[in-house]
Image (spheres, rainbow, N blue to C red):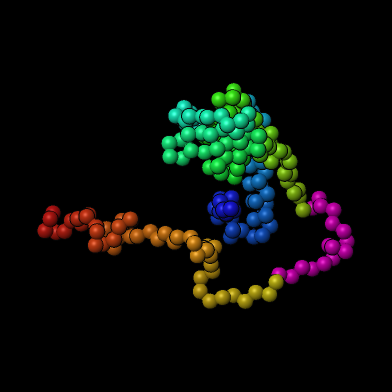
Amino acid sequence: MTSNNAESFNNTSRDARKYPITTLAEFLRYTLQTWFFERRTLAMESNKPLPTKIEKKLEDRIEATKTLVVQPLSHYEFYVMDGDRDSQVNLQTKTCSCRRFDLTGLPCTHALAATLSRHINPYSLCSWYYTVDAWLCSYAETIYPVGNEEERDVPDDISRRKVEPPPYKPKTGRPKTKRTKSKREKIIMQRHCSHCSGKSHNRATCTYMIPTASNK
């Protein structure tokens, strides 16, 4: 499991972090509203069983099956010869000894080779979660605007409450704006040259010659 989704969303809201909390919440709501509409529209316009990226991945794997040799073991089991990486496929349990099919739910090259040898539709082996129907279900709900504050129906016992901000003691130094990186993340520092003010190198490796009075 990775945090790619969280990192992507964190990068999207980078400039909005400095907003007040209500403005930040509205920014996040509007962003999700836009994303849901755009992705829902793409899913509805698709005329294929799988989304474009998954369709391309499946086509590339089908193209790679041309170099494989399939030996049937039973009606559902096959031995697929792939050079030094031979694998055993079971189409009934949707498994392959290479484990790629088992872990991802998308047929690996060996499973596709066995499928095509039996003239079975490759789409029938794909997990439902890769289909356009699943894609459409992910963005089926509509995110609505919050509306004007004056139009909200707030109970009297709630409106009478006065909410104070939590106690806060300012820390010395400049306020932190970037998140703390984990130990496994690499910290990439941009080098600057003190000789020519360029990037990606330093003074010792600089090849730029600054003109002097003697060179003019």
Q: Residue furthest right?
A: 156
Residue at image position (64%, 60%) is 20
Residue 160 falls within the magenta-colored stretch: yes
Residue 195 falls within the magenta-colored stretch: no
Pick whichever, 21 or 55, lies toward us.
55
Q: Which residues are magenta?
A: 150-165
User: Is residue 135 visible in the rendered structure shown here?
Assistant: no
- Quarter location, residue 171: bottom right
Q: Is residue 48 left or right of residue 196?
A: right
What secondary structure is the magenta-colored segment mainly?
loop
Pick whichever, 95 or 54, lies toward us.
95
- Quarter location, residue 127: top right
Q: Is residue 150 left or right of residue 128?
A: right
* Number of marks: 0
Residue at image position (60%, 42%) is 102
Residue at image position (84%, 63%) is 158
Residue at image position (35%, 60%) is 191
User: Is residue 71 visible in the rendered structure shown here?
Assistant: yes
Q: Residue furthest left?
A: 214
